[in-house]
Amino acid sequence: MSDERDTRLPLAPWLQRQLDNLLSQRGHAWLLQGPSGLGQYPLGLALVEAWLCDAPTPHGACGQCASCHAVRVRTHPDLMVLMPETALLALGWPLSEKAQSEIDDKKRKASREIRVEAMREAVQFAQRTSSRGRGKAVLVYPAEDMNHITANALLKTLEEPPGDVRFVLASEAAHQLLPTIRSRCLTHSLVWPGADEAGHWLAGQGLPGAAASVLLRAAGGRPEDALMLAAEGLTPESWAQLPRALLRGDPGVLANWPAARNIQSLQKICHDLLAMASGAAPRYFAANELPRPPAHKVLLRWARSLSEAARTADHPYNPGLMLEALVSEAQIALNSATESTP
């Protein structure tokens, strides 16, 4: 991802409306919460950019001043971004010199959680005087990636915040945060866009209407996730064919994806079959794209197995063998419905 992609593109209209609302309120700490794919990161970044802007408007940062440019090129002296190092690298934010040196020298790998060392640097940053006179801002995303020690380090600063620093905690699993942290923030729950508005926005990002509709359904109604699926090469045809391909033991699109994405896709099939078995409509697939639901106990057993597999998805012992096992398990579960037919 390029350094400027998320700051140069206009906010999606439903995010812009939420930004306008947030900017009309006061508070030193905001918790932006909701499921993944609803825009916590771009909304949080737009909020801190507006706070630091030299010429802010009721609708956000001006986008033209020296402050906005500094945010865009990731060099603003009054902005601290706290993320797992893997996320910082993916989104174009620089690591500290020490962290970058350790990773370059192969002393360790980039962290998948927000390290306590980074939080301690943020605490020191919060206590310093603003460089540009517009105050300071700290953006934490995903906030649930703080471990207990890191979260407690942040808590002390939230309890007694310095006068010119404000915080945005953006989370896709706010229930995992310490209750004491949640209680010290103003909370904003992200709004789900309507299907028509989301589809129109996706079309503006280069997805034609039919593809946008299918990928939006595949993403559970989350527009950013739909865009990510498209970027990863998912086509409407391959998604629609996946359940019946698994019925034949064919991995299909799963062969090109990492383990975590594969497990999520299988969980979506399992979810929809459980819904159909209970008389509800499927969420991620069209009903005619799914095979006949297996017995309820088979689906529950499959769901539990997928949940266990998800715990090691980021570090599978052997990705190829893991995919083979996942496809085999799916084929057995899906074919049990046919085998049980009188």
Image (cartoon, grey):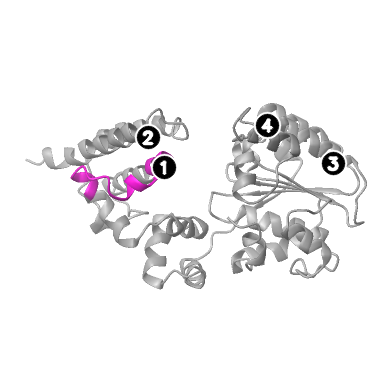
Nearer the N terminus, badge 1 or badge 3?
Answer: 3
Q: Residue furthest left?
A: 342
User: Is residue 249 on the magenta stretch?
Assistant: yes
Q: Is residue 287 above or below residue 98?
A: below
Marks 1/3: CA–CA distance = 37 Å
Say which residue label 4 marks. 102
Say which residue label 3 marks. 125
**Horizontal side of residue 225 vs 263, given as left or right:** right
Residue at image position (39%, 31%) is 309
SS assignment for the magenta stretch, majority: helix
Marks 2/3: CA–CA distance = 41 Å
Nearer the N terminus, badge 4 or badge 2?
Answer: 4
Residue at image position (33%, 62%) is 236
Nearer the N terminus, badge 1 or badge 4?
Answer: 4
Marks 4/3: CA–CA distance = 22 Å
Q: How many marks?
A: 4
Marks 4/2: CA–CA distance = 27 Å
- Return the x and y of residue 171 as percentages of the image width and height: 62, 45
For badge 1, the amino acid type reads: Pro
Question: Looking at the image, is mark 2 or mark 3 nearer the viewer?
Answer: 2
Nearer the N terminus, badge 4 or badge 3?
Answer: 4
Q: Quadrant of the N terminus?
A: bottom right
Say which residue label 2 marks. 319
For badge 3, the amino acid type reads: Phe
Say which residue label 1 marks. 258
- Return the x and y of residue 276 as percentages of the image width and height: 28, 49
Q: Tell me which segment is drawn in magenta.
A: 245-264
Mark 1 and mark 2 residues within 8 Å of each other at the beta carbon: yes
Marks 1/4: CA–CA distance = 26 Å
Marks 1/2: CA–CA distance = 8 Å
Residue 330 image-quadrant placement: top left
